[in-house]
Image (tube, coloured by chain):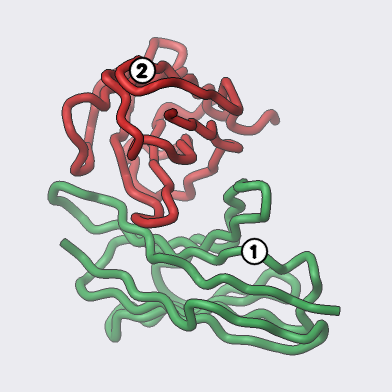
Chain colours: A green, B red
């Protein structure tokens, strides 16, 4: 099946710092989505981004489908950004349609 | 518009028992997917339903089953529980007929503990 690798696995930031999270995938995908899981387990949609660039406030994402990677940028990080960030991809067919990466655990300290 | 709701939020069962979890999607959404999240395996896709039909399934044993009702509410059932079934079970709904990621919106999850 498709492999989804996220890096770094863990990240500690000082409040106000910027960061880049990466998601690499091993095969062509139809769709890609970034999620933030808060400490209570709730998965929150950040971006639905099969290709191109999107921005939402302090967050932005870029997917280069032809090179099989996506990047999530967090600027001016805040303590509320803490949690785990997941990348999920969907391929066009096959047995397991949706695959999640293992996530990047982000801790923002004041 | 109300989000995805899951009940119950927490559940404790013993080995060998069975459990049923419920998910109500966002109003108007007809696709419901289920995921299992564990520390060791991460987030894994269980199955997806659309218009009461299972459209796709992940690599889980037959003890895991599900169904969807005409109002798009979905249930998943796990029979003969094992310790390894302890996990956070997440439900997601989406609007698009083709299912898959298509901007999935997740519920708060049901945390199942098997003793």
Residue B43 picture location, percent across and down: 39, 52
Residue at 26% x, 27% y: name it.
Answer: B64
Task: Give the residue number, with chain letter if any, for mark 2.
Answer: B68
Q: Secondary structure at mark 2?
A: strand
Closer to the camera in the image, A53 or A74: A74
Query: Does mark 1 fall on the same chain as mark 2?
Result: no
Residue located farthest toward the right when viewing the structure as drawn: A110
Q: Quadrant of residue A99?
A: bottom left
Which numbered marker is on residue A107? none
Question: Quarter holding the C terminus of chain B?
Answer: top left
Chain of residue at mark 1: A
Q: CA distance from mark 2 to mark 1?
A: 32 Å
Residue located farthest toward the front when viewing the structure as drawn: B115
Q: Secondary structure at mark 1?
A: strand
Residue A9 picture location, percent across and down: 48, 77
Q: Quadrant of residue A88?
A: bottom left
Residue at 54% x, 78% y: name it.
Answer: A10
The reply, left or right, for residue B94 in relation to residue A4 is right
Task: Give the residue number, with chain letter if any, for mark 1.
Answer: A83
Q: Give the tally of numbered discs.
A: 2
Residue at 45% x, 21% y: name it.
Answer: B13
Residue B60 picture location, percent across and down: 21, 38
Residue at 59% x, 27% y: name it.
Answer: B10
Q: Label 1 crowding class (10 Å Cα cut-off): few <14, some 14-19, many 20+?
A: many
Q: Label 2 crowding class (10 Å Cα cut-off): few <14, some 14-19, many 20+?
A: many
Q: Nearer the viewer, mark 2 or mark 1?
A: 1
* One can see residue B51 in this view: no
């Amino acid at each position: 099946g498709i492999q989804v690798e996220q890096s770094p696995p863990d990240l500690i930031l000082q409040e106000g710092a910027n960061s880049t999270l990466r998601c690499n995938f091993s095969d062509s995908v139809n769709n890609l989505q970034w999620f933030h899981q808060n400490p209570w387990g709730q998965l929150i949609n950040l971006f639905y981004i099969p290709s191109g660039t999107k921005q939402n406030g302090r967050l932005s994402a870029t997917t280069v489908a032809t090179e099989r990677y996506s990047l999530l940028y967090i600027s001016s990080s805040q303590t509320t950004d803490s949690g785990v960030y997941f990348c999920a991809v969907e391929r066009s067919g096959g047995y397991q349609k949706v695959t999640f990466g293992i996530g990047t655990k982000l801790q923002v300290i004041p | 518009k109300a989000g995805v709701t899951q009940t119950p939020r927490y559940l404790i069962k013993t080995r060998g028992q069975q459990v049923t979890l419920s998910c109500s999607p966002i109003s108007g959404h007809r696709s419901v997917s289920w995921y299992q999240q564990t520390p060791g395996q991460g987030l894994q896709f269980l199955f997806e339903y659309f218009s009461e039909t299972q459209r796709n399934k992940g690599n889980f044993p037959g003890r895991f089953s599900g169904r969807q009702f005409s109002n798009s509410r979905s249930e998943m059932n796990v029979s003969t529980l094992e310790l390894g079934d302890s996990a956070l079970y997440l439900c997601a709904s989406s609007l698009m007929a083709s299912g898959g990621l298509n901007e999935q919106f997740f519920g708060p999850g049901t945390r199942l503990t098997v003793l």
